[in-house]
Image (spheres, rainbow, N blue to C red):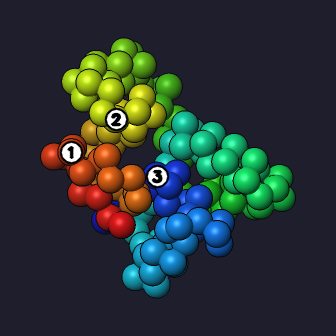
Amino acid sequence: MKVFLDSSFIIAYVIEIDDNYKSALKLEDEKIFDNECYISNLIINEIVTVIGNKINLDLALNTYCAIKDNCIIINEYDTSNFNDNVMNMYKKYNTKLSFTDCAIIEIMKKNNINNLVSFDKSFDRVEEIIRIY
């Protein structure tokens, strides 16, 4: 199964004080990482920034290396008109989803990925996505 990993999941997985830490570990126990895992540069940016700011540079670097070694990284900017398409989706959801969340939807759509590992309930309003949490 193809799954896209959202920053909320990865951050919860590596930061023990995160509210969703135990849920992230449960997903690991359920073998979520045995799937074909995808992530994008935008999400890596969020993950590294949050972990670096909340914890430290070493954990941010280790997390980045783990992502690089275990996920398929999608370069969203290889997609023509990417930001225009994301902006159209952002307008469609009338700011009920962030621009980055709309980018995730666009990336998933372009890469035929239906499953999203995320603790962000905002994605529940997107019919084309199956949120795993």
Residue 111 in view in this figure? no
Q: CA distance from mark 3 to mark 1?
A: 16 Å
- Give the number of the mark in front: 2 or 3: 2
| Element on which disc 2 rests | loop
Q: Residue furthest left?
A: 127
**Is 88 drawn above or below residue 2 in the view shown?**
above
Whole-percent x and y of residue 40? 51, 42
Whole-percent x and y of residue 8? 50, 55
Q: CA distance from mark 2 to mark 1?
A: 9 Å
Q: CA distance from mark 2 to mark 3?
A: 14 Å
Q: Which mark is residue 125?
A: 1
| Element on which disc 1 rests | helix
Whether the residues at callouts 2 and 1 have beta carbons within 8 Å, the answer is yes
Q: Which residue is mark 3?
A: 6
The kind of residue tagged 1 is Arg
Whole-percent x and y of residue 127? 16, 46
The kind of residue tagged 3 is Asp
Whether the residues at callouts 3 and 1 have beta carbons within 8 Å, the answer is no
> Is 74 situated left or right of 126 in this image?
right
Displayed quadrant of residue 27:
bottom left
Q: Give the camera-side residue of 121 and 24.
A: 121
Q: What residue is drawn where x is 50% and y is 68%?
A: 20
Q: Earlier in the sequence, mark 3 or mark 1?
A: 3
**Is 68 drawn above or below residue 70 in the view shown?**
above
Q: Quadrant of the N terminus?
A: bottom left
The kind of residue tagged 2 is Leu
Q: Which mark is residue 14?
A: none
Q: Residues within 10 Å of mark 3 (few under 14, many from 20)?
A: many
Q: Which residue is mark 2?
A: 97
Q: Earlier in the sequence, mark 2 or mark 3?
A: 3
> Is 49 situated left or right of 80 in this image?
right
